[in-house]
Image: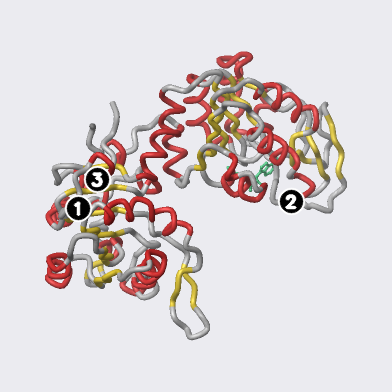
Amino acid sequence: MAKLTVSDLDLKGKKVLMRVDFNVPLKENEAGEVIVANDNRIVGALPTIKYVIDNGGRAILFSHLGRIKSEDDKKGLSMKPVAQKLADLLGKPVTFVPATEGPELEEAIAKLNDGEVLVFENTRFEDVKNGVEVKRESKNDPELGKYWASLGDVFVNDAFGTAHRAHASNVGIASNIAQTAAGFLMEKEIKFLGGAVEAPARPFVAILGGAKVSDKIGIIENLLGKADKVIVGGGMAYTFDVANGKKIGNSLFEADKVELAKELIEKAGDKLVLPIDAVTADAFSNDANIEVTDGDIKDGYMGLDIGPKSIDLFKKTLDGAKTVVWNGPMGVFEMPNFAKGTLEVGSYLTTLEGATTIVGGGDSTAAAQQLGIADQLTHISTGGGASLEYLEGKELPGIAAISEK
Ligand code: AMP
């Protein structure tokens, strides 16, 4: 079933509640004012915001910003500088209301004209009331979702990064309003991440890396059931090596996951593709002594990247793929001497003809950006935890709450 998107809505004259992801880093300028340090997320939300106002909607924007556990936390986490940045980027005034509820907010909304934009205060200010942590936003207080829903006519959710959580500002509002639609960013995440796990063009190859098996078990298990091949690299491959009876020296591994790795190896057969060599070092340092080995790893050495034979094997495995999902680096890519595996495998994705290539958040997004290939891949997910849970095959409450077409 397809989800309703913002372009399906009749927006003219409507009060459009918009949950955006304005959880941006802040900093102090020389005058001691708090300003936005990086506006990527605000820029990312512009297409949906512009669409709404260009079509005569009255945009009422809100987002969480940081974590609020005490009244003190509220001081540095107001949405005011974010609203200012948005006004600069839109090139038009934005009304900022320093409240999350009450007459000031309601009156400002009543005064909005078609095509105008309002931003209200950090939704997580509702998590602390009179100094007490009540988590009205984060625990989806039913009264709060109902109240926010009452402020608008329709709801557009464009904040994928919180879709794995049921909060008042996503699920709460959606449960109390006639129509909830995905914004363009959310629509893209559903199309690519959702599409890959639900109906991928085949062959479908997943590349999983990163430090720990325990962080990625859910994804490995889900994708072993869906993908044609699952490549495992990075630190987590050594737990599989131990399961296969190899010696791994001082490499990262999780003793309590060896049995599980054995089960996965048995279940997966040739679907699971593991590294066949490693770049090893005698210390966790870019300046360590380095040896490439395709056998057991020597005592005193640790595997910090996949070796050249593994790079070739992984490239061959990727040949002809029509869908690729990549999550996690192949080695300690932050250190230049151990970045080659991640670099070569990541760059290879850009050469696959006719393939949909998807990066699933977190460190692999950083790696794609570091490699300068981000704009040559089909989709880079904006969600960390949300993309992991999506790839695990879980239903995300924020997406489930969006209306069907
Ligand atoms: P994750 O957050 O699980 O995607 O893990 C990313 C981190 O895993 C990066 O900081 C990498 O440096 C680290 N990593 C990847 N391969 C290895 C390895 N062989 N040994 C230690 N850490 C690794």
- Tell me which corner region of the image, top left, top right, bottom left or bottom right, holds residue 199: top left
Instruction: Pick the quarter of the image with the N terminus.
Output: top left
Tell me if residue 186 comes above or below residue 80 in the rendering: above
Residue that appears at 77% across and 29% down? 247
Label 1: element kind: loop
Q: Within 10 Å of the Cα at label 3, are there few (<14), some (14-19), or many (20+) other Cα atoms?
A: many
Q: Position of residue 37 (x, y in %)?
A: 50, 68
Name the quadrant where ligand 1 sits: top right
- Tell me which corner region of the image, top left, top right, bottom left or bottom right, holds residue 50: bottom left
Mark 3 highlights which residue? 171
Q: Amino acid at mark 2?
A: Met
Q: CA distance from mark 2 to mark 1?
A: 45 Å
| Residues at circles 2 and 3 in contact by the CB criterion of under 8 Å | no
- Disc 2: residue Cβ within 8 A of ligand 1's nearest atom: yes
Mark 2 highlights which residue? 335
Question: Does residue 59 appear to the left or right of 249 in the view shown?
Answer: left
Mark 1 highlights which residue? 141
Which one is nearer the viewer's eye here, 186 or 123?
A: 186
Sequence order check: which comes first, mark 2 or mark 3?
Answer: 3
